[in-house]
Image (cartoon, rainbow, N blue to C red):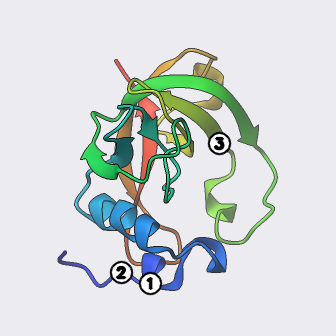
Amino acid sequence: MTKNNTYYDKGLGGGRNTLDARRFWEAAQEERLIVQRCDECDEYVFPPQDVCAYCWADALDWVEVDGEGRIHSFSTIHVDIHSTWGDRVPYTVAFVELDEGPFLVTNVVDCEPDDIEIGTAVEVTFGELPAEDGLFPQFRLRE
């Protein structure tokens, strides 16, 4: 890793700094999207966990995914509710289902809110964290 990233050192939201989450954030700094996959049942698991959510095996490995998926649901925020995101209003928060199966809560960038619909194809991109030094995965419309 080339950047000194305080984001995962401090933890997301002050309480999510786990060993498993650290691997996710380290990969994001390299503009790679990784999720866990169970060696026992081959299911993809996200968010990071100690045991598989499908078969309870503790045989989870990190694998890189292609970062493509579809909008499962979304909401566009039009009110400045937090100073960190105020200069980005309006912005869209989406529930994206990756092609591999897991869901991520993320935001959708580089488009107008009216361009987003349920089922819209998206792909990962990496943006700068507001008020932090580091990258985080977000999604844009796929062409």
Q: Position of residue 125 (x, y in %)?
A: 35, 44
> Which residue in the protein does label 1 denote?
9
- Looking at the rendered structure, the kind of residue marked 2 is Asn
Q: From this view, report whether residue 110 is shown above or below residue 85.
A: above
Going 29% across and 37% down the picture, which residue do you hit? 65
Quadrant containing the N terminus in the rendered view:
bottom left
Q: Position of residue 113 (x, y in %)?
A: 64, 30
> Which residue in the protein does label 3 denote?
93
Q: From this view, report whether residue 10 is shown above or below residue 134.
A: below
How dense is the environment of label 3, judged by Cα within 10 Å: few (below 14), some, or many (20 and up)? some
Res. 5 mark: 2
Going 69% across and 63% down the picture, which residue do you hit? 86
Q: Say whether disc 2 or disc 3 marks the residue closer to the N-terminus.
A: 2
Going 52% across and 69% down the picture, which residue do you hit? 130
Q: Classify residue 85 by image quadrant.
A: bottom right
Foreground disc of the pair 2, 1 = 1
The local secondary structure at tag 3 comes to strand
Q: Nearer the viewer, residue 49 or 138?
A: 49
Decide if residue 60 is in sight here: yes
Gap between marks 2 and 3 measured at Cα: 24 Å
Gap between marks 2 and 1 measured at Cα: 7 Å
Q: Say whether disc 3 or disc 1 marks the residue closer to the N-terminus.
A: 1
- Looking at the rendered structure, the kind of residue marked 3 is Val
Decide if residue 122 is in sight here: no
